[in-house]
Amino acid sequence: MQNKKNQTSVGQMIQRCHKWRQKRKQYMDQARQTADEIERERLMQTAEHYGRIVAAEQGKIDSTRGPADKTAAPAPAEEATDADDDENAFPDFISNLK
């Protein structure tokens, strides 16, 4: 019974995470389209805030899931482009796959 409860909880966390990723993308898209520098900065800060929320929630999801459930999920496109700027952005387990 406890396992079923954990699965439901993880499912809800994943749904919240997805919703926050969509909000982050929405704010980033709005920031790219606005001409006002102050509004652009405000939108980018809001997007960054959602990014921090997603990272914290993803940490909770990873710690709650069982070892059998921890398969690598593909990163959303907006997060993948942010990581391309820094060569050291990948965790060790990804960069040591030789």
Image (tube, rainbow, N blue to C red):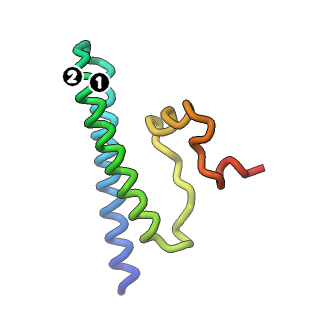
Quarter of the figure with residue 30: top left
Quarter of the figure with residue 78: top left
Q: Picture coordinates of residue 28 (x, y %)? A: 32, 30
Identified by mark 1, the residue type is Ala
User: Given the current orientation, which residue lies at the most extreme right position?
Assistant: 98
Task: Left or right? Give the position of 43 relative to 71.
Answer: left
Q: Which of the numbered marks, if any, corresponds to residue 40? A: none
N-term mark: 1 or 2:
1
In the displayed structure, would residue 71 be above or below residue 3? Answer: above
Task: Left or right? Give the position of 62 relative to 26.
Answer: right
Counting labels gives 2
Give 50 or 7, whichever is nearer the viewer: 50
- Image quarter hosting the N terminus: bottom left
Q: Which of the numbered marks, if any, corresponds to residue 31? A: 1
Q: Which residue lies at the image location 35% right of the left edge and 47% below the top edge?
A: 52
Q: Which residue lies at the image location 48% right of the left edge and 34% below the top edge?
A: 82
Q: Picture coordinates of residue 16 (x, y %)? A: 29, 55
Identified by mark 2, the residue type is Glu
> Which secondary structure lies at badge 1?
helix
Q: Picture coordinates of residue 47 (x, y %)? A: 30, 36
Crowd tier of the residue under label 2, counting other residues whose Cα lies within 10 Å: few below 14, some 14–19, many 20 or above:
few
Crowd tier of the residue under label 1, counting other residues whose Cα lies within 10 Å: few below 14, some 14–19, many 20 or above:
many
Give 38 or 19, whichever is nearer the viewer: 38
Q: Are marks 1 and 2 in contact (CB under 8 Å)?
A: yes
Task: Left or right? Give the position of 18 relative to 77.
Answer: left
Q: Which residue lies at the image location 57% right of the left edge and 42% below the top edge?
A: 89
Quarter of the figure with residue 33: top left
**Residue marked by disc 2:** 39
